[in-house]
Image (spheres, rainbow, N blue to C red):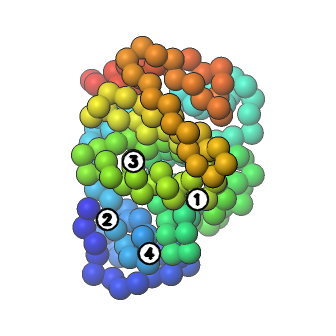
Amino acid sequence: MVATPVTKLTFEEYLTYDDGTGFHYELVDGRLELINIPTIEHCLIAKFLEQLLDTEIKRLSLPALTFQQTGIRTGRNKSRLTDLCVVTQEQARDLLKAPSVFETPPLLVVEVVSPDSIKRDYRHKRSEYAAVGVPEYWIVDPLELKVTVLLLEEGFYEETLFTADQKIVSQTFPELVIAPHQIFAAGNL
């Protein structure tokens, strides 16, 4: 992760920032932080989960949508990019012609861990997502072959760890049937 030479930005300036490189940045205390390009394994896992959750949303006729690489405002001058998030159709409608940075908490956020995102996914995003009220946060870790599901309880996340063939329990999708080994298998060709 490399910081760009731009000085401090406000959240509003971040929403319209474009340095012409096509790179993606998170805003952390007014500083732009470059997010590295993901591996193919990372992309395959995120795509698999997006398709899985889209199927569940459709099956249950839920007024929700999944998105990859959208932002969440997590503070005054903070915004994080998600690997995958589930939002209501109303939340998406509010941003239809605006930058895709949600200022209200998504129903579910999924982060796929990569070597350069371990601290960011397990520590920084965990505390920031809890602070803005994201009710469910999954940390999908292909490095450790585990999925951590965090459910917001009284402002703090209660953590449940799933490995191998254990069925992941989701508050947002209680009928979902998926195990970590299936998720990590999707990262292979």
Spatial CA distance of label 1 from label 2 is 23 Å
Is residue 96 at all visible to an observer of this figure? Answer: no
Are the residues tagged 2 and 4 within 8 Å (C-beta)?
no
Q: Residue furthest top?
A: 165
Residue under the image location 54 percent in, 54 percent down: 129
Give percent across and percent down for residue 25: 38, 65
In the picture of the structure, the residue carrying the numbered disc 3 is 122
Is residue 181 at all visible to an observer of this figure? Answer: yes
Q: Amino acid at mark 2?
A: Leu
Numbered tag placed on residue 131 in the rendering? 1
Spatial CA distance of label 4 from label 1 is 15 Å
Q: Is residue 26 left or right of residue 119?
A: right
| Label 2 Cα neighbours within 10 Å, binned few <14 / some 14-19 / many ≥20 | some
Q: Is residue 30 left or right of residue 104?
A: left
| Secondary-structure class at tag 1 | helix
Spatial CA distance of label 2 from label 4 is 14 Å
Q: Select label 4 or label 1 by which is in front.
A: 1
Residue under the image location 33 percent in, 82 percent down: 6
| Label 4 Cα neighbours within 10 Å, binned few <14 / some 14-19 / many ≥20 | some
In the picture of the structure, the residue carrying the numbered disc 4 is 29
| Label 3 Cα neighbours within 10 Å, binned few <14 / some 14-19 / many ≥20 | some
In the picture of the structure, the residue carrying the numbered disc 2 is 34
Q: Nearer the viewer, residue 39 or 7?
A: 7
Give percent across and percent down for residue 170: 60, 29
